[in-house]
Image (tube, rainbow, N blue to C red):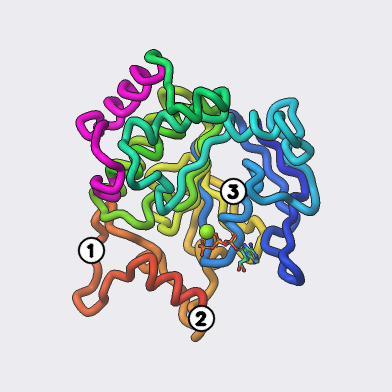
């Protein structure tokens, strides 16, 4: 169980996350949505302390995450794995070594320097790659894989840490719809089979609706919606996304990719995540 109590992060005069209070029970699959700059990444990064809060407290079970330092902080980062939009693999390194790097925090400096991995770890890495459907690429360089395959390798690396929580910051924003579906299905499967809490930032409402039992909507650093997909009414969507800056409401269709192949009017070009960012950044 995560408990966030008044969690705040300021950057200079800007309050990126503003007094967020939330309870997230173990095993939930949570989607965090909101327009660009709403504070989604900052919130996620505070959970594994890539960013330090400067107000409030974060607790996980009996541990005060926001107070950890040194080896306790390193241990927390193992428990709380993260995947990113840009995968963050080592491009020239082979896939299986990338996955084995998920155990690096737990290994001695000497074995790390000599790139010595225990056989049991190698077999486990291959098992995890198999489960994610990319074992056949185990010996290839990571850079030789498609985006969707690389993201599955990044998820394998995260699983190699045996995390208690999996954080994903827009894991499908760089992927085409088919690969986006494969990656979201993998996250859901991990959540359901291992009971690992998954908290993922998503740019698209339809993905959050399809995959997440709980949706948290952020606007200007605050939580403005917290509920199920069914409770996410047009009114709630308006509150989260506001208008496009010219008084026009941002409709659900415009925040949608086509994971669920939503038909669009002929004259409307489906906007890419990059276009959406630009649209909301200029709002
Ligand atoms: N390291 C930083 N230094 C200064 N300002 C920052 C920093 N990180 C984030 N911000 C600012 O904090 C606010 C929230 O940013 P954040 O990246 O959390 O938003 P986001 O909801 O993830 O947006 P996006 O959908 O574009 O990824 C933004 O105004 C951003 O410019
Ligand atoms: Mg972000």
Does the rendering let one see residue 27?
Answer: no
Relative to 124, 15 lies left or right: right
Q: Nearer the viewer, residue 236 or 200?
A: 200
| Residue placed under numbered mark 1 in the picture | 263
Does the rendering let one see residue 281?
Answer: yes
Q: Position of residue 150 (x, y in %)?
A: 32, 44
Q: Position of residue 48 (x, y in %)?
A: 62, 41
Q: CA distance from mark 3 to mark 2?
A: 24 Å
Q: Main secondary structure of the magenta part?
A: helix
Q: Residue at x 39, y 32 (%)?
A: 99
Q: Residues within 10 Å of mark 1 (few under 14, many from 20)?
A: few
Q: State yes or no: residue 183 in magenta.
A: no
| Residue placed under numbered mark 3 in the picture | 44
> Which SS class for mark 2?
loop
| Residue placed under numbered mark 2 in the picture | 282
| Tag nearer the camera, 2 or 1 | 2
Sequence order check, earlier mark of 3 and 2: 3
Q: Residue at x 24, y 48 (%)?
A: 146
């Amino acid at each position: 169980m995560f408990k966030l109590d008044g969690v705040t992060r300021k950057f200079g005069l800007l309050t990126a996350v503003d007094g967020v209070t939330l309870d997230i029970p173990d095993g939930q699959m949570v989607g965090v949505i909101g327009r660009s700059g709403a504070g989604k990444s900052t919130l996620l990064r505070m959970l594994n302390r890539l960013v330090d809060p400067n107000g409030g407290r974060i607790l996980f079970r009996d541990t005060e995450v926001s107070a950890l330092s040194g080896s306790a902080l390193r241990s927390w980062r193992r428990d709380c794995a993260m995947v990113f939009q840009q995968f963050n693999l080592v491009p020239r390194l082979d896939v299986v070594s990338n996955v084995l790097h998920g155990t690096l925090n737990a290994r001695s400096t000497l074995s790390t320097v000599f790139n010595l991995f225990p056989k049991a770890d190698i077999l486990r890495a291959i098992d995890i790659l198999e489960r994610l459907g990319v074992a056949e690429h185990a010996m290839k360089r990571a850079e030789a894989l498609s985006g969707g395959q690389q993201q599955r390798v990044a998820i394998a690396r995260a699983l190699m840490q045996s995390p208690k929580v999996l954080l994903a910051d827009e894991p499908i924003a760089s992927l085409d719809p088919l690969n986006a579906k494969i990656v979201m299905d993998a996250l859901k499967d991990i959540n359901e089979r291992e009971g690992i809490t998954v908290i993922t930032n998503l740019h698209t409402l339809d993905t959050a609706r399809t995959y997440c039992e709980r949706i948290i909507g952020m606007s200007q650093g605050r939580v403005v919606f917290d509920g199920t997909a069914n409770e996410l009414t047009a009114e709630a969507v308006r509150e989260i996304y506001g208008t496009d800056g010219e008084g026009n409401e941002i409709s659900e269709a415009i925040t949608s990719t086509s994971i669920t192949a939503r038909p669009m009017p002929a004259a409307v070009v489906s906007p890419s995540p990059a276009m959406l960012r630009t649209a909301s950044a200029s709002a």
